Amino acid sequence: MASSIKSFYIGCAKTLGLGDLTKVKTGKERTEIVTKCANGYIKATKEGDESLRSAYISALMLLFWGEIKKMVDKCRTVATLDYEDYVTKLFECINTACESQGWIKDTNLTAEQCIRSVIATRGIAAAFYESNLNKNKVNSNTCSLDTPLTDDEGHEVTRLDLVSDETSLDSDLTAKQFVQSYINSNKIIEAIILDTIAFDNCNKYTKKTVVVKDENDNENKVNKVTTEFWAYKLVQLVSSLPDDYFKSFKTKYSINDLVLEAAINKIRASNNQKLYKYLAVTLADAKTKVADFM
């Protein structure tokens, strides 16, 4: 099964003429190929070119194929997932990184670094989280919903891993359903905050150089990128909702026009201190609801 899946991706990626992507070694050439394919995937997605989109995502899957075995090895205790599930997880991680476009927004980063960062935070972590859901248990090490965070202005809030880039929500549909549940409870401001966390880039990317050993025990310096939910960025986004936010929110959720307009106006009239309070209340409330929702 594994070989047939891989063969499918090889066939799709061949049209790009990039050679054998299963044998690209670490280095500048690989970094450039990953960036080329990631940018190509984003462009093809925007233009609706399904043929090119399939080719580029196939190429990216092959370039990061080794990550599947790493996930399988580290998640041997997760009996509920099979090999195909880990292939899907890799696809989801790559797609998430391409949607975030971290290397385009921050030129100090590369596409490869951003993709690896998402794999590190959503691949294995999501697998363990799903396992815990299936067992009807909560793993506090995997889902630290109440980890205190301090933003650049010194405000402490609660982290909600559920809907950030390190989250356990497996799809846009699940996130939308969670937000809709708040709308149905007439908690519109909270719904807007959760929608922003789920679908906008509220992460802080940190890059540092570390020394790692290769298979020959040689030491090499590599750049390691980590991501974390950034309350400061969330407040910035909410405090400056775009003019078309009303329309975009309406396309995703079922909500009364007047109710939504009133909530948006209330947010726009709030200062940052008030928005931080809204955020803290929202995260604390969501923490109590996520287990029942899932």
Image (tube, helix red, strand yellow):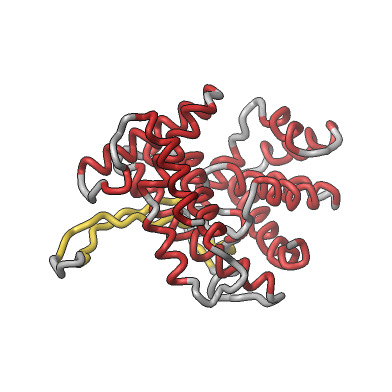
Q: Quadrant of residue 217?
A: bottom left
Residue 260: x, y in percent? 79, 36
Residue 104: x, y in percent? 38, 35
Compared to residue 44, the image places residue 117 above or below, namely below
Q: Would you say 98 lies left or right of 137 here?
A: left
Residue 252: x, y in percent? 73, 36
Q: Would you say 229 lies left or right of 184 here?
A: left
Residue 166: x, y in percent? 52, 58
Q: Would you say 230 lies left or right of 24 here?
A: right
**x 61%, y 48%: residue:** 198
Quadrant occupied by the C terminus: bottom right
**x 47%, y 57%: residue:** 228
Compared to residue 64, the image places residue 71 above or below, namely below
Compared to residue 247, the image places residue 288 above or below, namely below
**x 40%, y 32%: residue:** 39
**x 39%, y 40%: residue:** 59
Viewer-closest of 66 and 19: 19
